[in-house]
Image: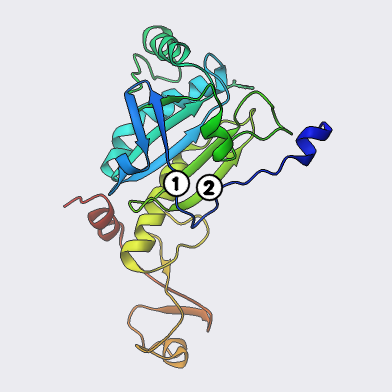
Amino acid sequence: MDQANQNEVVSMPRIGDKAPSFKAVTTQGEINFPADYSGKWVILFSHPADFTPVCTSEFMTFATMEKQFEEANCKLVGLSVDGLYSHIAWLRTIKEKIEYKGMKDVEVKFPLIEDITMNVAKTYGMLQPGESTTKAVRAVFFVDPKGIIRTIIYYPLSLGRNFDELYRVIIALQTADEFGIATPADWRPGDDVIVPPAGSCGTAKDRMDGKEKNVKCYDWFFCTKPISKDEVLKKVLNKK
Ligand code: BEZ
């Protein structure tokens, strides 16, 4: 890294921060972020460049899963430091020409931000000079209905994202909020969840003695309870 980059102070939004607001031009018109998404979850993600293979595979996957995210009250917003006409041409090429892993005729309906000034990419710490000074890395910001950043994931240029994991994160965050629980390693809907520490409604000893209904303790600090997949889906996806 050169001296100028080494000395540059970069501030990035963190988990728990309010998502920095910005207005931007996108393939779906202008957006005012995050205000336009109030009351919804939104995934703001960056990709390095249009007309590149890893990004193409990612966009086809995300577009194919858009309805699934929509059912979880989650909107998608992409960004790269390319211009609008490049975005439009690339998305048209994807729809008209690319068939990949059974996906074809894929229309990207979610907005893709043009960020030629790199203002948004810089604000969100999407430019990481050690990886590239001209392209955004693969950043993923999960923003909740109140505009608070709840999870951040970064991938380097060469590594395509795992979209099952991005969907798992959205469902797990919403499940944690709805049920007041935490989710253990590799949790998926239907798996046991972690209950908060015993407080006024039950002592740790009661829990350890198995007196709290359905609660299983591995030790005093580590207790779980079941929540069925149906319960999760009903609450999070509003499925009857
Ligand atoms: C890609 O999406 O294929 C890619 C983009 C930038 C650097 C390396 C790969």
Q: Say which residue label 1 marks.
A: 142
Residue 238 point in image, percent of width and height: 21, 51
* Front residue (pair 40, 81): 81
Q: Say which residue label 2 marks.
A: 152
Instruction: Give the number of the disc on residue 160.
Output: none
Q: Residue furthest right?
A: 3
Amino acid beneath label 2: Ile
Say which residue appears at 45% left-offset and 62% top-offset.
183
Residue 204 point in image, percent of width and height: 46, 89
Secondary structure, mark 1, is strand
Between the C-alphas of marks 2 and 1, the distance is: 6 Å
Tag 2 and tag 1, C-beta contact below 8 Å: yes
Left or right of 1 on screen, residue 137: left
Its colouring scheme is: rainbow
Say which residue appears at 55% left-offset and 44% top-offset.
153
**Total numbered labels placed on residues in the image:** 2
Secondary structure, mark 2, is strand
Please state the quadrant of the image where ligand 1 appears: top right
First in residue order: circle 2 vs circle 1: 1
Q: Is residue 96 above or below residue 109?
A: above
Say which residue appears at 37% left-offset and 42% top-offset.
34
Q: Residues within 10 Å of mark 1 (few under 14, many from 20)?
A: many
Amino acid beneath label 1: Phe
Q: Residues within 10 Å of mark 2 (few under 14, many from 20)?
A: some
